[in-house]
């Protein structure tokens, strides 16, 4: 989930990572990379007439996976010069955890967001804005989605559609194991 699957996804990340916030808070890289990857998967699904992230169970699994990813990156050992940023990262983690927990509760009660990936991006962007020295940070998810969607026909031509087929095959695999028929 951490690495974009398309060239355009990589370009989107490169443009985002050029922002000062990512130079200071480099532990955010895999978190935003995961958001771009989710947007890629979502757009590929849309092109196929499928909505992989509309199922409540999938949404809850993705929320849990994002929380674990963020926790893993925040809790990695800190170098001496990074220690002063730990408190900022901790507050970011606590904010994302609280808000994603609220989103999870909404999902459980049947109040699913109209666009799950965008909702997750908003939470993470707003919590990023709360980091010291960061003002008004946001990712243009709609712009990123449009770039991804516009790129899909070109992706379908590369390697006779092999790359796109592989990405679709990954999307078709269940996020969790299904009970086996006996």
Image: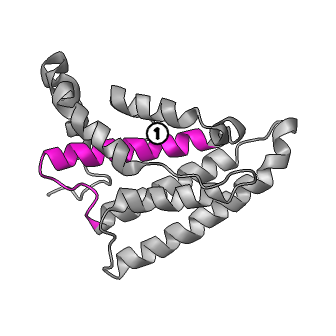
Viewer-closest of 179 and 7: 7
Residue where numbered disc 1 is placed: 2
Residue 174 relative to residue 28: left or right? left
Q: Position of residue 36 (x, y in %)?
A: 41, 42
Residue 102 relative to residue 82: left or right? left
Give the secondary structure at mark 1.
Answer: loop
Q: Which residues are magenta?
A: 28-55
Please identify the residue farthest to the front as the structure is shown. Answer: 136
Please identify the residue farthest to the right as the structure is shown. Answer: 80
Residue 7 relative to residue 68: left or right? left
In this rendering, is residue 54 above or below 135? below
Q: Position of residue 23 (x, y in %)?
A: 68, 35
For disc 1, the neighbor class at 10 Å (few under 14, some 14 to 19, many from 20) is: some
Please identify the residue farthest to the bottom as the structure is shown. Answer: 109
Quick check: can you spot residue 55? yes
Residue occupying the point 63% across, 45% down: 73
């Amino acid at each position: 989930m951490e690495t974009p699957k398309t060239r355009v996804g990589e370009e989107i990340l490169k443009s985002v990572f050029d922002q000062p916030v990512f130079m200071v808070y480099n532990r955010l890289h895999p978190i935003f990379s995961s958001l771009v990857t989710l947007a890629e998967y979502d757009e590929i699904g849309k092109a196929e007439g499928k909505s992989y992230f509309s199922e409540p169970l999938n949404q809850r699994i993705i929320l849990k996976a994002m929380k674990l990813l963020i926790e893993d990156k925040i809790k990695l050992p800190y170098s001496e010069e990074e220690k002063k940023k730990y408190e900022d990262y901790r507050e970011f983690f606590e904010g994302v955890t609280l808000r994603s927990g609220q989103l999870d509760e909404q999902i459980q009660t049947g109040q699913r967001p109209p666009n799950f990936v965008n909702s997750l991006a908003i939470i993470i962007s707003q919590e990023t804005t709360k980091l010291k020295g960061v003002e008004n940070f946001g990712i243009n998810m709609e712009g990123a989605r449009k770039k991804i969607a516009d790129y899909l026909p070109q992706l379908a031509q590369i390697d006779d559609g092999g790359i796109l087929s592989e990405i679709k095959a990954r999307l078709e695999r269940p996020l969790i194991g299904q009970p086996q028929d006996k």
